[in-house]
Amino acid sequence: MADAETDIQYIKGVGEARAKRMAKLGIHNLRDLVRAYPRGYEDRTAIRHVAELVTGEAVCVAATVGNDPRERLIRAGLGVTKVSAFDETGVLEITFFNQSYIKDQLRRGEAYVFFGKVGGSPLHPEMTNPIFEREGANSKTGIIAPIYRLTAGITPAAMSNAVRQGLAAMAEQFPNALPRGVREEHLLADARFAYENIHFPASWEKLDIARRRLIFEELFVLAAAMRLFKLARGEQQGRVFAKSNFTEFYAALPFELTGAQKRAIDEAATDMASGERMNRLVQGDVGSGKTAVGAALCWFAAKRGAQSAFMAPTEILAEQHYRTLGALLEPLGVRVGLLTGRLKAKERREVREAIALGMVDVAIGTHALLSEGTQFRDLALVVTDEQHRFGVNQRAALAAKGESPHSLVMSATPIPRTLAFIIYGDMDVSIIDELPPGRQKVETFAVGEKYRKRIYEFARKLVGEGRQVYFVCPAVEESETEELKAVNEYAERLQKVIFPELRVAVAHGAMKGKDAVMSAFAAGEYDILVATTVIEVGVDVPNAALMVVENADRFGLSQLHQLRGRVGRGKHKSYCVLFEGAGNESTNERLRVMRQTNDGFQISEEDLRLRGPGDFFGSRQHGLPELKIASFASDMDVLRAAQQAAETVLAADPELSAAANAPLRGEIERMFQLAVDN
């Protein structure tokens, strides 16, 4: 008997050489091996008569070999073995390539079961290189067969055999993080049943039972981990700010805040007055007014003699925040400073000195705020804009410049609430689900190539009225295999051929000076900006009234929604045109959603359903573990049940110190150690 940590090279049939190859699949020990779940299954349970075979279908056929296998060499290195097999309804012609041993394994007059894809025609069916065994053996056919991820040197048979040996070696030591009470309450299978039937299911029903157990367990561990982190974080003390109302701040604003904005401000201010360190996410759609929420809390801290840091992912966005926050806060006596890499050495030195002496109440900047040369006199609040653009270590480095400062992070990428719990499970969440008055809906159209000339004319008309236009492309260079609009070539064509009389600029992530180009566009120095998604988080251009997205099928819904949010930011009627590209049914369904709603949260739910979670955040860039069997897209009901179960367990045992919860704690530690290592 082996335990979960046993190196797989010691498992029967693996050995040192094969273990090295399997390491490329992330399989190092017995636990990894039994958790190398199949990526799919082949149904080898259906037995067909020859007359019932359908071309293209993969099925089993029970047939008798009618002749001795015939072998011949077509050319050097390519041998062919042919044989005919029959049942009472017809004849099946079978071909094997480079398998000369077949002639010794198939005997005339004996019955076999062949599994493979049917070729030929209905009257003359064929199979090429089928799997086969004697009728009644039921080890390769008559089963639901697992399909595994493979790597060079690991065949399907070798992988299946290794897993079988691994399951046998495990005996009763299967990984099991579910407390008995949770398993019984949710009617889940035991660990041994689940692992055996996820790999080699006795039936489709038993496969479903196994999958449900393992999916629940994986999401339960993740939910428990996030809850545990949140409880641990709650123990951190933070600066106590005596809570007061924001009447003075609201009265000084040139606009009325929405109820959702005021609610988010109140929730954050309550955190800051609680005595515990705030760790709150403000999530809102494009244009919902998150910056005003951040400004209110910076004012709140400044009125109590403390400093705030406001970090933006790009210099252009930092400069925009500097202008916006300066206009809001300086009339209230709050001193605002800007620190970016663009400043000259002398200016940078002066700003840093002012921050260190406490002469700046709100320091706005990029990662320059993180550098060793930047010191704060009394940093009590860190506001991070576009939170997913910063790594955990960057945010931690800024927080380390104060004594446990409160943290407010903002995201303009609407995330489904269920997914937000996992990604931001250690944070409290405020959702701004109202748009400020006057924020208009952007009319959206999905069109084919036949409308291209009309769209160009519409763009020219808008520019003639004094507006500006974005054209967004998915590629920087022309693709050799796909018709993707490449930003440089496309910009050149628009300038020279389509709009020679207009001012066309180009911006993409790989070019130097892209921020200067976008600033010039914002200043009205260009009529048209051709760009990649570098503009997704960029400067505010109220005069831009048309967004044209080329090859829209290459973008996720949430990304398209972010791009659409670049227009409609001023008083002018605005439009978004999506060129359909490939135009398959899946693409068309996604683009229909874009036409029907401007609600970012509704769009994010659809994106999750249609594409899975990858379009929001890759797990690796967030330090989250990679799910091996569960899916945020299809297992939402299980996730909710797993979250509730995890909260119940942690309510009774907040530190998971009970013996019954030791396996769960160990699994959490292992899961997140893997995420950090990767």
Image (cartoon, helix red, strand yellow):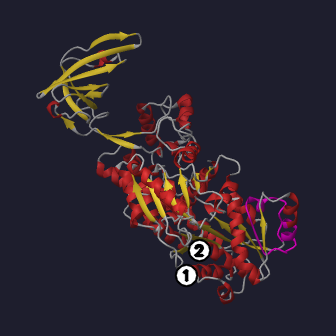
Which residue is situated farthest in the left direction here? 88
User: What segment carries the magenta color?
Assistant: 351-376
Of residues 614 and 577, the one drawn nearer to the viewer in this rendering: 577
Q: Mark 1 points at which residue?
A: 258
The quarter holding residue 261 reads bottom right
Q: In this view, does 439 lie to the left or right of 124?
A: right
Q: Does the magenta stretch include residue 357?
A: yes
The answer to the question of whether label 2 and label 1 lie on touching residues, with beta carbons closer than 8 A, is yes
Q: Position of residue 474 (x, y in %)?
A: 53, 48
Residue in the picture at 62% in, 60% down: 538
- Up-down relation of residue 108 to residue 429 (above or below): above
Left/right placement of residue 557 relative to residue 402 reads left
Q: Which amino acid does label 2 sit on?
A: Gly
Secondary element under disc 1, as helix, strand or loop, is loop
Disc 2 designates what residue? 289
In this orientation, which residue lies closer to the viewer: 364 or 4?
364
Query: Secondary structure under badge 2?
Result: loop
Which residue corresponds to the image point at 54% horizontal and 75% vertical from the top-left? 432
Q: Position of residue 24 (x, y in %)?
A: 55, 37
Q: Residues within 10 Å of mark 1 (few under 14, many from 20)?
A: some
Residue 311 x/y as whole percent: 71, 65
Q: Which residue occupies 65% across, 46% down? A: 510
Q: Which of marks 2 and 1 is nearer the N terminus?
A: 1
